Image: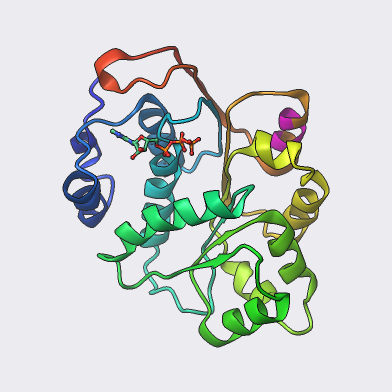
Amino acid sequence: MDLGWVTLKGLVNPELLKTVEEVFCFTTMTPVQAACIPAMLNYKDVAAEAVTGSGKTLAFLVPLLQILLRRDAKWKKSEVGAVIIAPTRELAQQISEVLEHFLRSLPSLSCALYIGGTSVQDDLDKFNESGTNIIIATPGRLEDLLLHREASNLPAALKYLEVLILDEADCLLSLGFEKALNSILQMLPKQRRTGLFSATQTTEILKLIRAGLRNPVSVVVRDRQTAASLGEFLLDY
Ligand SMILES: Nc1ncnc2c1ncn2[C@@H]1O[C@H](COP(=O)(O)OP(=O)(O)OP(=O)(O)O)[C@@H](O)[C@H]1O
């Protein structure tokens, strides 16, 4: 199996590949990337069980950006096309740093972090003033923002949602965010692609998969290797 990023040529915007190859200097996809990117580009929901360090961030950022770039109409600031939920501020910030590298060559898209540490009102003001196309959030803060419906343009902006990512889903649940996640899922449009990434698969994760994903492709990667030495790599369509 050819895991070169170059195999995505023609399937994804050249700027995305240029960032992967010239900024990150990656030549081959990791197994989780090779499985998740084509599946998500093919409009599938993905439930991926992959160990820490297996390259999950690009496995969801590349298809997420490509799905947004596919839309003919230019994204307005008042339209949120993607939401990424991460369990901790640090992880949300790390994802945002990786995403910023891509956005430097994609000026039509913007990203905002909603991770607490400031008042909910500050974040509402920030969104109402500037809007954004991609939200990276921790679940508690996102739920708070969504519950302030009367003072916020966010619920209307989320009607345009195309992609939802739940990163480190096992961690999201072990930190007690199940209720917040279910409440968020209730408030998001059902017509979307969803990717769920987790280091382990538990009964609780399966429950979350049933609640938030539709006919997902299941990806299991138990080793961290890149193409040089493919580990266990199961794809279940
Ligand atoms: N295709 C690739 N080729 C080489 N290195 C890669 C590739 N994709 C990601 N990496 C590197 O592998 C490391 C782990 O990637 P990433 O943080 O996305 O993994 P993760 O599975 O999300 O890990 P964590 O659970 O720790 O967040 C990072 O240093 C990243 O830069």
Number of numbered callouts drawn:
0
Q: Can you give x and y, in whole percent of width and height, for residue 165 in the image?
A: 56, 48
Q: Main secondary structure of the magenta part?
A: helix
* Residue at the outermost bottom position: 129
Reply above or below: 21 against 234. below
Q: Can you give x and y, in whole percent of width and height, for residue 11 in the image?
A: 27, 45
The answer to if 206 sits in the magenta stretch is yes
Question: For the point 74% across and 38% down, which residue is it?
Answer: 173
The residue segment tinted magenta is 205-209
Q: Quadrant of the N terminus?
A: top left
Residue 146 seen anywhere in this rendered image of the structure: yes
Question: Does residue 198 appear to the left or right of 75 in the view shown?
Answer: right
The answer to if 41 sits in the magenta stretch is no
Question: Does residue 155 appear to the left or right of 13 in the view shown?
Answer: right
Residue 200 occupies quadrant? top right
Specify how the rendered protein is coloured: rainbow
52 and 70: which is toward the camera: 52
- Location of ligand 1 given as a quarter of the image: top left
Question: For the point 53% across and 79% down, which residue is it?
Answer: 131
* Residue at the outermost right position: 179
Question: For the point 64% across and 56% down, which residue is it?
Answer: 138
Question: For the point 75% across and 36% down, which residue is it?
Answer: 174
Q: Can you give x and y, in whole percent of width and height, for residue 183 in the image?
A: 80, 55
88 and 168: which is toward the camera: 88
